[in-house]
Amino acid sequence: MQRLRSTPGFLAMALLVVTAWFLPAAAQSDNAGLEPVLSQMDKAAANFRTTQASFVSDQYQKVVDEHDIQKGKVYFRRVGNETQMAADITEPDKKYVLYADSKVELYQPKIDQVTSYSAGKNRADFESFLVLGFGGGGHDMLKSFDVKYLGTEKVDDLDTAKLDLVPKSQKVRNTFQHIVLWIDPARGVSIQQQFFDPSGDYRLAKYTEIELNQKIPDAVFKLKTTAKTKFVAPQGE
């Protein structure tokens, strides 16, 4: 699968993970400060219905020393046993990303094309990456990551709990060496995420104007295509 440079960090990660499934395993942590953070995330996950936020994403490529800045809005909602996600990318180019019915769809209005990726039988694993810090339980992360508590750090005057996640699966580490989350302890959600590639590239996504459990119109979770939109899927999808 080609690198999707047009999507923000957590979305690029979501699409790449379609081809990099991980094998869950039990985990424990002796970090004294970690348990309260995981418990608060568990509480937020139990009460989760919807989340929406504005984001700014910086995708850095080390080889060319280049930063690709993306801006937009992201939305999550739980429908039955499924978590759905929609992203409206507004800068620098208009794009939409939708995850629903075990499928990721990327719509590019400029070329009027939708590219689809199927999560298939690995939907549960796929969603665990997708909702990392947004509706996902804290202790659930321990099934797939070695989680380390890095203390507190201010992000926009907010004292956050900083967590470092190392995927247990070598296959996943080949794509993302480790992930850093900045968690708002009061709400149990992530306000900043950074994904590090083995190459030295990283994707840093920052979230503001976070709204929890507010009504989100159904139209947000539908692609705004045209009668001439072309639908494609990578080989094997």
Image (cartoon, rainbow, N blue to C red):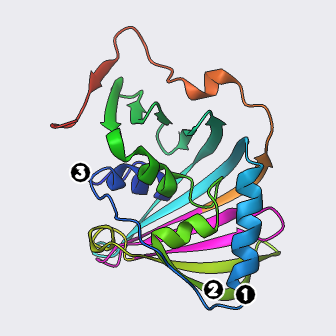
Residue corresponding to mark 2: 149
Kindly check if marks 2 and 1 are in contact, taking CB atoms under 8 A apart as contact. Answer: yes
Question: Mark 2 or mark 3, which has the lower sequence index?
Answer: 3
**Of helix, strand and loop, which one carries label 1?**
loop
Among the 4 quarters of the image, the one containing residue 67: bottom left
Rendered image: mark on residue 33: 1
Q: Position of residue 163 (x, y in %)?
A: 61, 79
Residue corresponding to mark 3: 2
Kindly check if marks 1 and 3 are in contact, taking CB atoms under 8 A apart as contact. Answer: no
Q: Position of residue 148 (x, y in %)?
A: 57, 85
Residue lying at the far left in this picture: please name it.
235
- Amino acid type of the residue tagged 3 in the rendering: Gln
Total count of labels: 3
162 in relation to 127, above or below? below
16 in relation to 103, above or below? below
Given residues 231 and 92, the one toward you in this image is 231
Residues drawn in magenta: 178-205
